[in-house]
Image (cartoon, helix red, strand yellow):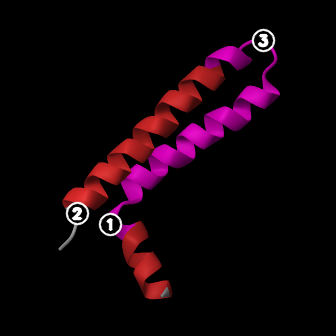
Amino acid sequence: MLTHLKLFIKLYKDDLFVIAAGAGMLYFATLDRELGWFWNIAGCVILFWGIATLCMNVRSGKNQK
C-alpha cells in the first residue's frame, strides 16, 4: 500500500503541490488581519483549481505510465 501512495505522489506531485499551496494561503489568511479576505479568496480558488485538475488527471489517466 505504501508503494501505491508513493507512486500516486510521484505521478501527481504538481497537482498535489497546488493543493498544498492553496491550503497554505488559507492558513496565511488567519495570520494576516488586513488582507485576510484576499488570502481567503486566493486560497479557495487555488485549492479548488488543484482539486479539479487532480480529479481530471486521475480520471483521464494522463500521467500513468
Q: Secondary structure at mark 1?
A: helix
The residues bearing labels 2 and 1 have C-alpha atoms spaced at a distance of: 6 Å
Percent coordinates x, y for residue 10 in the rendering: 37, 69
- Identity of the amino acid at label 1? Leu
Q: Residues within 10 Å of mark 3 (few under 14, many from 20)?
A: few
Q: In the figure, residue 7 lies in which quadrant?
A: bottom left
Quarter-wise, where is residue 13 in the image?
bottom left
The quadrant of the image that shows the C terminus is bottom left
Q: Judging from the image, what secondary structure is the residue with disc 3 in?
A: loop
Earlier sequence position, callout 2 versus callout 3: 3
* On screen, residue 65 above or below 29: below
Tag shown at residue 34: 3
- Left or right, 33 with respect to 16, comes to right
**Residue where numbered disc 2 is placed:** 63
Q: Residue at x 54, y 41 (%)?
A: 21
Mark 2 nearby-residue class (10 Å; few <14, some 14–19, many ≥20): few
Residue annotated with mark 1? 11
Given the image, on which type of amino acid does mark 2 rest?
A: Asn
Range of the magenta residues?
10-38
Question: Can residue 6 be seen in this snapshot?
Answer: yes
Disc 3 residue type (three-letter): Glu
- State whether residue 62 is above or below residue 23: below
Q: Main secondary structure of the magenta part?
A: helix
Q: Residue at point 43% right, 46% down? A: 51
Q: Disc 2, disc 1: CB below 8 Å?
A: yes
The front one of 40 and 28 is 40
Residue 49 is tagged as: none
Earlier-in-chain disc, 1 versus 3: 1
Instruction: Give the camera-side residue of 30 and 55.
Output: 55
Q: Position of residue 42 (x, y in %)?
A: 55, 24
Tell me the residue at 78%/11% (across/down): 34
Q: Is residue 18 magenta?
A: yes
